[in-house]
Every structure is written in C-alpha cells, then in structure tokens.
Image (cartoon, grey):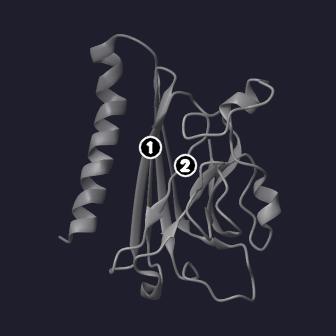
Amino acid sequence: MTVPKILAATTAAVLVTAAVCAPAAAGAGTSAVVVAHGNLRDLQLGTAGPFDQARARVTMVQLDGRSRVVLQVRGIDRSASGRAFGAHLHTGPCVTGNGTAAGPHYNSDAVAGRVPPRVDATTEVWLDFTVSGAGTGTANTTVPFTPLPGKRSVVIHEMPTDHHGAAGPRQTCLPVTW
C-alpha cells in the first residue's frame, strides 16, 4: 500500500472512530460525519488546468460544536508538483463552469450575523495543500464551529490562502451536501 493510501485509510479510520466513540466517552454532544467524493468539477471550462482529471474526498466530523475537516485530492497533473493551492468551504453549490454559484466562503461570523465578520482560519474552513510528486494533495483543519447543512462546495483556488482569506481565481470544486 502506498503512503498516500495508508494516510487516507488511517485518517478515515481515526475520523470514523472519533465520530462513533467520542460521544460515549465524552458523554456530551452528538456527532455527525459528512463525506463527499468524486470527480472535481471544472470552473474554468475551455482552459486546461492541473485538476482536469482529479478526484477529491472531503470528510467532516462534527462533534460538540467543532468540526474536523480532511480534504484529499488525487489525479492532479504532476506538472503542478510543489505548488500550493487554497481550498475553502463555500456557501453555495458546486456548478460546472460557474464558479460564482459557489458563493462566498462559509464564514461562521457572517452566519451568526456579526458585523463585520472576522475572516480567518477560526471563522472559515481553510484547506490549503501542496501537490506532491505523485499528483496528490491533503489538507486538514479543525474549526470551532459546525457549518449549517445545505448544498455547499469545497472550492480549490489558483493560489494559497493569504491572511485576508483570498486565494485567487476559482479553479475547480467538489459538491458537499448534508
């Protein structure tokens, strides 16, 4: 088994174990596991990009008002090896050829009505990754909130996330619904 497959299997086992065992051990909040996987949807039709043949998997475990999110991408063009990309949970659906449909980043302050909302890795789900020589990328984060259910998307952007939450044009996305 390759290292990425071992990491993926281990991550999945840990997430499922946490979701199943944590409520009993902690005696507190309920847990939910959200899993979405499949081919990435191209947001820049007619333009060749490193994600044109890629697939992704997002796993989110929600427990006691916190969320642990893991993004795994494979099949990335190996010419992108060593490049970093920003990826974020967005409020809207993933629609091929229409990056605008994904809406803005999911921001817990904005959802709570805080004005102005803070924009950082504690109010949004940031999943930046660097492409390996094997054409894979993995990111994970834990945030102190539970995103509300809906038709959402994980959008991969052209650049890494800066300190303002920007990461450049939208390249591709994965639908995530729960």
Residue pushed farthest left? 1
Q: On the rendered image, what quadrant is the C terminus found in?
A: top right
Q: Nearer the viewer, residue 126 or 146?
A: 126
Residue named by callout 1:
141
Q: Amino acid at mark 2?
A: Trp
Q: Secondary structure at mark 1?
A: strand
In the displayed structure image, the side of residue 111 where residue 6 appears, left or right = left
Mark 2 in CB contact with mark 1 (< 8 angstroms): yes
- For the image shown, how many numbered marks are present on the structure? 2
Q: Position of residue 71 (x, y in %)?
A: 46, 56
Residue named by callout 2:
126
In the displayed structure image, the side of residue 37 where residue 120 appears, left or right = right
Distance from label 2 to label 1 (Cα)? 7 Å
Q: Secondary structure at mark 2?
A: loop
Picture residue at 71% right of the left edge, 60% below the top: 94
Q: On the rendered image, what quadrant is the N terminus found in?
A: bottom left
Q: Is residue 150 above or below residue 160?
A: above
Q: Amino acid at mark 1?
A: Thr
